[in-house]
Amino acid sequence: MVSQLEPHRCAAPNLCIGRCRWHSVHTMPDGTQFTGDSSTLAGHICRETRWPSCTHSVIPTRRELLRNPSGSFAFYVIGFGARVTGMLVVAAHAFLNGVGFQLSSHACGYEDMAHPHCFFQPVSACGATASHVCSGCALPSVVANRSSTGSDWTLGRTLSTMHVQRLCHHLVGAEEACKQSQRWGEHEAPATGALLAWRALAALVLRLQPEMEVRVTALLAQRFPNMADGARPFGAVHIRRRDKTALEWWGREARPIDTCVFAERLAWLAAKDGRDGAMPVFVATDDHRTVDEFAQCNAAVRHSWTVHSWPGEPARGVNTSVVVRLWSEMQLLRRATWAVGTLSSNIGRLVQLLRSQPPATFWSVDTNQQAVIPPDRRFLFHLNQTDKAELRAQRRVRAALAKTAALAIRRRDSNLRRPPPWASVLKGHDANR
């Protein structure tokens, strides 16, 4: 509920939305500007909170960002999807423990980090103290400014079924739907159980600030007017390449999947709803070569799809313009009638949680559909045996090449030290003179 009865003041537990002038702001170790229960004076929207009453807040962060909050390297390496999904897991635990929650400034663009609530709206206004919680550790834990309230609550790797049902009941209120398991085999089945709970939490926590919403809406209306409002049926796919599928020294996050597999799965989803003809399809990717590959796939040609993608090179970096563009592409994936992606990607997992359509209208080509729960991919990723074998093979090849190169260098050095074959002849000639 939005209230403007007091246009010049917004005090806790109500939330100030938009550009607010905070009475007091505290800078956290990771650079986040914590507002807590501070009231505001400015032109703004004052909204009632749906968060439980609380006197202390937690702010999720990553150890890399805590060590160097002003450094952009770790900020760049830890992608937007990984940062936000980790924060969402912390939000679930905070809600259930009656603790306030504020998104880290690392959910924003790099140049906006100095402002409180710089991308998403606040969700609670609790107390004047806050603790950092590590959202990217093997086992999330409090890492700084431990709670002064004495409530020594901890985070587990996952929420139990009972906790998820309680979260769902608080946020949705549909008790029967919260207890049901998701029927992935039924195309029109609505979200239930754990997925319903996580979707409700994502809808509460990941709401854009009005000024960011205006930027995203204008950008989509300019670039993709026929798909921006979701009024007409269209498809969308999210295809990750480059760093996602590269075999690094530690292994590989995901194996590359042929582009046409995405196209065939999209056609399969559309056919379930009786769609068997031309339609626009948006391709979100970090490698534009996949756009041409997708347009040449049999399914795209067979159904006369018109393929769209974001113009120009894929954006890379952590600036606000990059974050706004990424969120805009996610909105097209969210609004698409049918969407195909990979749940090994944090972005794919976020898209499933942000969608309101039946869950089976989004399909993952590389992971079981229920892997979207919990939302942090870090909790289910394990390097598979095939990648381990390939990694060992590559290491053996590199070791053999290094050994061959070292042997060649030793032979060359040995030849340089050895006297030439005519040296003894010249020496005997000189002696006889």
Image: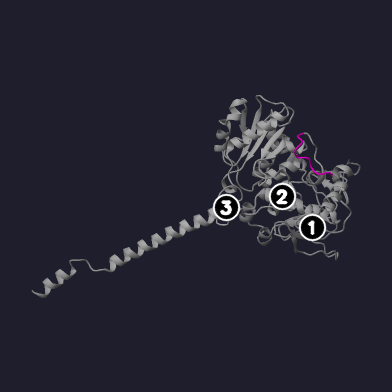
Q: Quadrant of residue 265?
A: top right
Residue, disc 1: 58
- Residue lying at 59% horizontally and 54% vertically, measured from the top left: 385
Q: Amino acid at mark 3?
A: Asp
Q: Quadrant of the N terminus?
A: top right
Nearer-the-camera pick, 419 or 109: 419
Asked if the residue at tag 1 contacts the one at tag 3, i.e. Cβ–Cβ closer than 8 Å, the answer is: no
Residue, disc 3: 387
Residue, disc 2: 84
Please give left or right for residue 134 compared with residue 179 in the image: left
Q: Amino acid at mark 1?
A: Val
Tell me which numbered mark, 2 or 3, is placed earlier along the sequence. 2
Residue 276 drawn at (x, y percent): 67, 25
Secondary element at tag 2: helix
Asked if the residue at tag 2 contacts the one at tag 1, i.e. Cβ–Cβ closer than 8 Å, the answer is: no
Q: Nearer the viewer, mark 2 or mark 3?
A: 3
